Structure formats: C-alpha cells, structure tokens
Amino acid sequence: MRDHFEIRDHDAAGRIGRLEVPRADVTVETPALLPVVNPNVLTIEPERLREEFGAEMLITNSYIIRSTDRIRDRVVDEGLHEFLGFDGAIMTDSGSFQLAEYGDIDVTTAEIIEFQRRIGSDVATPVDVPTPPDADRERAERELETTKRALADAEDADTGEMLVNAPVQGATYADLREAAGRHAAATDLDVFPVGAMVPLLNSYRYAEVVKAVRAAKRGLGPGVPVHLFGAGHPMMLALAVAAGCDLFDSAAYALMARDGRYLTVSGTEHLEDLDYFPCSCPVCAHHAPADLRGFGDGETERLLAEHNLHVTFEELRRVKEAIRSGNLLDLVDRRARGHPAMLDGYRALLDHAEELERTDPGSKDAFFYTSHEAARRPEVRRHRDRLGRLTAPDDLLLTESKAPSDHAYDAVWRVTPPFGPYPPALSETYPLTAEVPERTDDAAQVAAAAGVAALADANPETALTLGHDAWCDAALERLPDRVETENLRTLG
Ligand code: GUN
Ligand code: ZN
C-alpha cells in the first residue's frame, strides 16, 4: 500500500511529500503537523484548526474515547468527523501511550483497531509497546516482539480504506530501531511512527532523538512516510524534518499553555517573564504580555495555545520553504543556536552526512558557510568524494589566491575552504558557487585539507603544491607529506 505517499522535493533527508488518506478523501501535504485534540477538552475548536491554522490532519485518542462513557456512544453514532467538527483527515492513537504511563490497558490491538474503524478514523494505530529510552536491552527486545505481534494483528484486521500506523520501537538501541524499521516496512501497513520519543523530547535529548530516527530510517528505507510521535515543539521541527520525519503531532501547544508557557522557535518562555512578544501572530499583534496575563476563565490559556500553534505552523511553513530553496540545513543551523541540546542534535545529524548526502539535491541555492558545523555538511562531503575521482595533471598548483600570471605548473586550481580544491570547470557549479566568509575557521581549513588529501590519494603521480592562507596546524597535518605548502600570508 506504499503508493499512498509521494515525495516531491528533497533537501538533506527532509522532503515535501503528499500523503493520500483515502478514507478522508484528502491528500495531506507533508511535513505536516497534527494538532492533538483531547476529545474531552477542545482547547481550540477543530474547525478553527483547519480554517485559521491550516491543519489538514489532526490526531486524537481512540482509547480515551472508548473508556469515557460520556462521549463513547455519541462518537460511535455520529462518527469522529461529525463529533469533532473536522472534515480533514483524523489519525487516532490506540492507548499505547497510556500503557506506557500506567503499565496496563484493557484493550487488544484487534479490539482497538475495530473500534477505530467503527468511529471513522482515517489512520489507526495498533497497541505498540513504547519502551522507554534507558530500558535494558532484554526488555527492549522482549517488548519489540510484542509490538511485532501487534503489527501482525493489525495486518489481520478488517480495516477497509483506513490507513494503519506501524510504530517503530527499540528504545535507545540503534540496531533494534533499525531492525524494527525493517520489519515494519515489510508489513502491509502504511505510516511509520518512530515511538517512545516523548521522554527524550521532554528532557531535550535531541542527539538521541536524531540517532533513533536515523536508525529507524535505515531500516524503513527512504520511500515511506515517517511520523515522529509526540514531537511538535517549533524549535526542533527543522532538525526532525532534516533527519527524515514527515509527520508531527503537537500536544505541546495546549499542554504548555496550561502552565503559562509561550513557545518560540528558539525555546520556551514563561508568559510571566515576558515584557514584549517577539511574534506577530493575531494573538501577539493584539495583546501585550501584561494584557494576556490579566484574562480570566481560561482565556489566557486559550490565547496562549493559539499563539503556540501559530508559531508552530509558521515554523513548519518556513521549513517547507527551506526545503524548496535547498537551505534546510542553514535553518537547522540557526535553530541549533537556541539551545545547546539542539546543537547536539544538529551535530548528531551531521554524523550521518553520508546518509543525508544520498537524498540531497545536486544543485540548489548558493551554499552559505556561516558556522563551523557546516564544514561537515553533506555538500562538502560530496565534493570530497568527487575529488577522489578527479584526474589531476602531473604538476598542479592548488591555491587560495588567484593564479599567478606567470608559472610553470601544468594547471592551477582554486581552493575554497571548506570544500578544498576544484578545477576551473567546476567553479560555476554547485556547491562551489558558495558564499564563504573572508575570515575562515579551523574546521573549514581541516575540511579543505581533507579535500586536498582525497585528490592526492586519487592521483599518486601528481606533484601537488598548496598555497594556503595561514592554515591552522590541524589542517596542515591533515595533508599528505608529499604536498608542498606555501603560506601565502608570509609570501605577502
Ligand atoms: N504517542 C507518543 N509516543 C507514542 C508511542 O510510542 N506509541 C503510540 N502508539 N503513541 C505514542
Ligand atoms: Zn504569537
């Protein structure tokens, strides 16, 4: 059933796609944010979620509906769409989260899938077991077996046009996540949430989130829709999209509003502490923080929730535009400055530059080098790989400055940190059209030196001379011994 998902654009491992949801008769553009709707407390009316915020899909909890006498029969009679007043796509969760919180629930996968079908869910969820991050390996393996059985039960269920989630668990064991991803992708289920991320997200363990997502993605393969269960803070959307996630669900907008918290793209503020709003959404444009604090009757909470959701959807649009322009990693880099844990997440993502490179477009808007992390970006890596395949002439000058007018070399190639050397024919091609600062840094020099080394390795007979602008020792040490060097700074 994989043909429900079509990928339109790529940047790093991020993509813009279309998820067809046949039972709702809608196509949802991804990356998509699914606001979490508590069936008992509609903080913002679902109809407004669609009309004012642009939510094409939301998520609610079928287990809560099933265990709440007050609403169960009404939802069964009217159907979820009518009950919530929402005509987009509706995903339902199964009670697994309650299972993780309370240790026990009174429903099987077969029962809850049947219930989800009855109430008119468009995307259902089996009872997977969200193994917490630091569980021991034996428990993670045992619970993965239970999750596998839940997926098998979901495959056996009569689901009609309803799509079904195949959650990927495995705690913090990358090999288990990868194996779980491979198993899930081999089922005939449709959407692939990476599960049990909430404890990691709540404690800002973004490097481990990235590691788990990348492991799951290696198993799942590049073509399937991936949901990051429980993730919806605007600060981390760009990072999670760049790692390859397509769907998000935000309870944060409402939960945070409940205790006076105001979300921004660089973190969480307390309404109490704010003198000014750094945002121009309808809420912030019409109120000052002091006004907002003064409302009673849950009005403060409702307006805060609205701001929180506006800022989250705004970031999602920014992420999509960044994918289209090919500067998603620049956006991730900027977001990484909001919190050291986000920087850890970004650095963890760059550990996977080789994987990201596989889906990174060959050409896009000019590459901007604005932080030393960028020396590890996939584009730099790709150019280095290319250097390892280039044929160099016998006697070659590589230089950071212009070619001398009069020389005895066979050819002169320019060198630009962080990319390293390139033949003149490539100078107008991506990524060598990059904008780099005049004052480069050690990381860029070391990356450029690795480029020189790759070229030297591929051309053992070539005599190489490098003219560099006072490169650091670490960069000079990265060069093969046979490369002659000249410090252009001392030459004047
Ligand atoms: N909501 C947040 N995390 C999870 C998870 O791991 N599984 C399910 N079913 N729902 C979730
Ligand atoms: Zn606002």
Image (cartoon, rainbow, N blue to C red):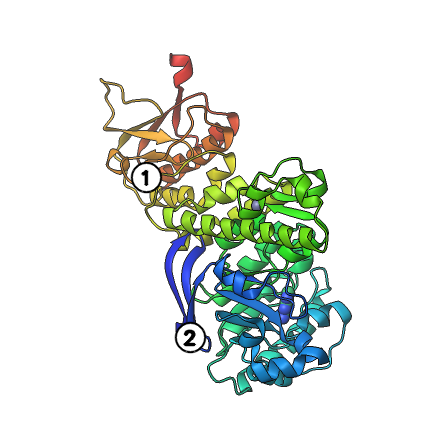
Q: Amino acid at mark 1?
A: Asn
Q: Quadrant of the N terminus?
A: bottom left
Q: Classify mark 2: residues with Cα within 10 Å, few (<14), some (14-19) or many (20+).
A: few
Q: Amino acid at mark 2?
A: Asp
State the mark number for residue 25: 2
Q: Position of residue 271 (x, y in %)?
A: 69, 43
The residues bearing labels 1 and 2 have C-alpha atoms spaced at a distance of 58 Å
Q: Position of residue 22 (x, y in %)?
A: 43, 76
| Numbered disc 2: secondary structure | loop
Between 198 and 206, the one nearer to me in the picture: 198
- Circle 1 or circle 2, nearest the eye: 2
Read off the residue under disc 1: 459
| Numbered disc 1: secondary structure | loop
Of the four image quadrants, the one with ligand 1 is bottom right
Q: Position of residue 99 (x, y in %)?
A: 72, 72
Q: Is residue 18 above or below residue 432?
A: below
Q: Earlier in the sequence, mark 1 or mark 2?
A: 2
Q: Residue at x 57, y 81 (%)?
A: 78
Q: Quadrant of residue 58?
A: bottom right
Cβ atoms at labels 1 and 2 below 8 Å apart: no
Q: Position of residue 190 (x, y in %)?
A: 48, 74
Left or right, 106 with reference to 246: right
Q: Residue at x 63, y 51 (%)?
A: 303
Left or right, 131 with reference to 317: right
